[in-house]
Image (cartoon, rainbow, N blue to C red):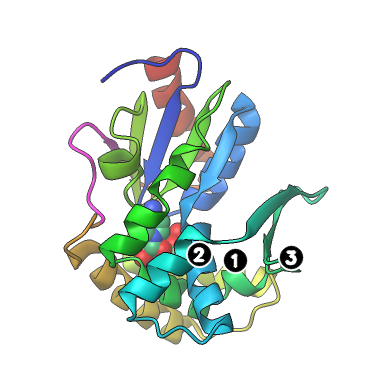
């Protein structure tokens, strides 16, 4: 590992609903670091594919789409949604957060040419004073020399309930049972794919948040980051 005191990276990986998103937002804000929401990029590729009628299994066309992705993240005044997301000039902040968009993302994500196409884009988020990188392969593929690696997990039941609350709070209606099934299917695709499967990096610190509050998880993460980065 090559420590980078100018732009250290904190890689946070884990399955859907593990609390990564909230923790990464809080961490980036507390440290004044940049934030990479890599899942949003896969969701945007899925959305762009639907918009342009590209089949979700056409690897070459999807990789071309990913290379030319016209996206922008703009700061907002809403602490719950600090960045708005734009695809080809259209505000898709809500559209990328639906369960369908997450499922589409996990269908295009196993394609190696698609993953390659956005690797440089993801790495371009690493800038001073540092980066919090949220995803599935941040510590294992994209930022293998990250200064701190955390793998956040929780039982599938706990994750389904959390996602349910999050989506309902955002005004997106969904059934808890359907969410549970969709989380199981997404875990299966993310953990068992050949390219960049979701696994903890060998040097990641694992936090199981099933019985922890978000504040307790955040405390643990801050302690780890303090030890690794200072
Ligand atoms: O984190 P989020 O739920 O937004 O991710 C959506 C999907 O994108 C994941 O289920 C996964 O299939 C894919 N993804 C990935 N690698 C990442 C981030 C997300 O394969 N680094």
Q: Nearer the viewer, residue 115 or 103?
A: 115
Contact check, label 2 and label 1, Cβ < 8 Å:
yes
Q: What secondary structure is found at the residue carrying circle 1?
A: helix
Q: Please report the bounds of the magenta region as a residue range.
A: 198-205
Question: On the image, numbered disc 2 is attached to which residue?
Answer: 162
Q: Position of residue 75 (x, y in %)?
A: 76, 46
Badge number at residue 89: 3
Image quadrant where one finds the N terminus: top left
**Residue 196 can be seen in this image:** yes
Q: Position of residue 93 (x, y in %)?
A: 68, 65
- Seen at 59% across and 43% down, the residue is 25
Q: Nearer the viewer, residue 225 or 220?
A: 225
- Seen at 59% across and 70% down, the residue is 96
Indicate whether residue 201 is drawn in magenta. yes
Q: Quadrant of residue 28?
A: top right
Question: On the image, numbered disc 1 is attached to which residue?
Answer: 166
């Amino acid at each position: 590992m090559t420590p980078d005191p100018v732009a250290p990276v904190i890689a946070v990986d884990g399955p859907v609903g593990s609390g990564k998103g909230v923790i990464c937002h809080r961490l980036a804000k507390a440290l004044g670091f940049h934030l990479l929401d890599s899942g949003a990029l896969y969701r945007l590729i899925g959305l762009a594919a639907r918009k342009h009628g590209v089949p979700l299994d056409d690897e070459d066309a999807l990789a071309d789409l990913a290379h030319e992705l016209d996206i922008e993240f703009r700061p907002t005044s809403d602490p719950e949604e600090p960045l708005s997301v734009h695809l080809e000039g259209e505000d898709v902040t809500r559209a990328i957060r639906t369960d369908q968009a997450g499922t589409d993302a996990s269908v295009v994500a196993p394609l190696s040419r698609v993953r390659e196409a956005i690797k440089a884009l993801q790495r371009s988020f690493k800038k001073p004073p540092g980066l919090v990188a949220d995803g599935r392969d941040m510590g294992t593929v994209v930022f293998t020399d990250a200064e701190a690696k955390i793998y956040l997990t929780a039982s599938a039941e706990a994750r389904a309930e959390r996602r349910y609350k999050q989506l309902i709070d955002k005004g997106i209606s969904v059934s808890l049972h359907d969410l549970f099934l969709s989380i199981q299917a997404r875990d299966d695709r993310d953990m068992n794919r050949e390219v960049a499967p979701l696994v903890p990096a060998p040097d990641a610190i694992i936090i199981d948040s099933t019985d922890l509050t978000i504040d307790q998880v955040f405390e643990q993460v801050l302690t780890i980051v303090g030890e690794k980065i200072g």
